[in-house]
Image (cartoon, rainbow, N blue to C red):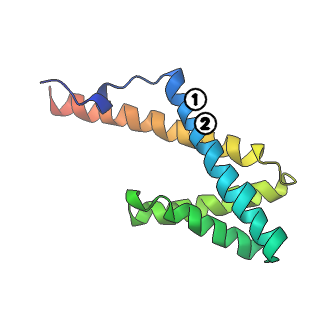
Amino acid sequence: MRSPAVYRENFSLLSILFIFAAASFEEIIFRQVILKLFVDQIGLHFLLAALFSSLFYALNHIYFGVNAVWQKLLTGLVYSLLFAASGYNILAPILTHAVQNVTLYAVSVNECKTRWEAKNV
């Protein structure tokens, strides 16, 4: 029996590029645009703006389940604080987010392959 395509996926440069692109878009939208809009245009305190932008970021991941929403809320707050601590340099949260996603992807691909092989010995 052949394994599903996701279990045969190779960890490739193209995968990494897509992950970096997705992380870049998310950080630009949720930190550079939404967070800055709340602070600069609406006048919210930074921490409240960070909470709102992180909540929107978290809800964007609801299809992964409730646990993922809580995790994304926390990481969104970390990315927001990193964004502010870097002097609002968007590259800081982009790189952190991308490295986290590449790491999770690598672990997931390896775990899926291991489970598939153990199940189909």
Residue type at mark 1 is Leu
Instruction: Farthest residue to the left: give it.
Output: 1
The 10 Å Cα crowd at callout 2, few under 14, some 14 to 19, many 20 or more, is some
Question: Relative to 40, is 9 on the left or the right?
Answer: left
Spatial separation of the CA atoms under disc 2 and disc 1: 5 Å
Query: Is residue 52 shown to the viewer in this render?
Result: yes
Depth check: 39 or 110 in front?
A: 39
Q: Residue 83 in the image: state x and y as whole percent.
A: 77, 55
Quick one: SS at disc 1? helix
Q: Which mark is on residue 17? A: 1
Up the image or down, 21 lies above or below 43; here it is above
Residue kind at label 2, given as amino acid type? Phe
In which quadrant of the rendered image does the C terminus lie? top left
Query: Circles 2 and 1: CB distance less than 8 Å?
Result: yes
- Residue 70 position, x and y percent, is 50, 66
Q: In which quarter of the image is the N terminus?
A: top left
Name the residue: 26% across, 35% down.
115
Query: Residue at 54% across / 22% down in the picture?
Result: 13
User: Which picture quadrant has residue 52?
Assistant: bottom right
Q: Position of residue 39 (x, y in %)?
A: 80, 70
Of the pair 79 and 22, the residue shown nearer to us: 22
Residue 45 seen from this side: no
- The quarter of the displayed image where residue 4 is located: top left
Q: Left or right: where does residue 32 sit relative to residue 30?
A: right
Which residue is denoted by mark 2 in the rendering?
A: 20
Question: Would you place residue 55 above or below residue 109 in this image?
Answer: below
